[in-house]
Image (cartoon, rainbow, N blue to C red):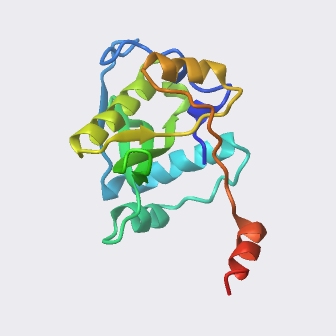
Amino acid sequence: MISPVSRPDAPADVQTGSPSNTPTDGIAITVRPAEEQDAQALADMANALNVAHGKSATLYTAELIHGEAFSEDRVCHFLIAEREGHPAGYALYHWMFNSDLARRGIWLTDLFVMPGERRHGVGRKLFSAVAAKTVESGMASLWWGVMSDNTQARAFFASLGARDEDARILELDGQALQALAAEAK
């Protein structure tokens, strides 16, 4: 799923940015790796993201988050942003292999800021934390998606030094995925 930062109505803190490390209202933003006890808050925020994309409001559960992000065979990682001790947003990412560089990288799947927490620098703080995780892990690149018509988000990402290669992200799921998989038998 492409995150709200890729939508035309994305939060302003993601679209236009705010000075790094400086919340716009003086309330400190803390970003940390999510822990098992955050699973319900993460599920709630992921479901809010789904609703923003016209998807199910009940797809994510604490159990699903636990199994995918905190189990022995985890497939993804979450960072959680907090303001005044309350969840303000999250970043969901996983490892990937960048064949252009022949090195590992990180794919940022979701960057979500709660509606009431937008325009305070939360999105930028989460995004910079994912960039730091990429560098600290010795990864060569950070990739994510953005809709082609979301010029504000694209301008924000360009201001960070991102290259906009006008690539397309494609998805195969449901019946189309099943039909193609059946061809391999």
Q: Quadrant of residue 180?
A: bottom right
Q: Residue at x 45, y 50 (%)?
A: 42
Residue 67 is situated, as x and y percent measured from the top left of the image, at 42, 68
Q: Is residue 160 left or right of residue 12?
A: left
Q: Is residue 151 left or right of residue 104?
A: right
Q: Quadrant of residue 182?
A: bottom right
In the image, residue 66 above or below residue 95: below
Residue 8 is situated, as x and y percent measured from the top left of the image, at 68, 25
The mark tally for this picture is 0
Q: Nearer the viewer, residue 77 or 101?
A: 101
Q: Residue at x 61, y 32 (%)?
A: 6
Q: Quadrant of residue 128?
A: top left
Q: Nearer the viewer, residue 13 or 171?
A: 171
Residue 181 is situated, as x and y percent measured from the top left of the image, at 68, 77
In the image, residue 83 above or below residue 68: above
- Residue 61 visible at all: yes
Residue 68 is situated, as x and y percent measured from the top left of the image, at 43, 64
In the image, residue 127 above or below residue 183: above
Look at the image and tell me in which quarter the C terminus lies: bottom right
Q: Residue at x 66, y 52 (%)?
A: 57
- Residue 85 visible at all: no
Q: Nearer the viewer, residue 158 or 49?
A: 158
In the image, residue 41 above or below residue 120: below
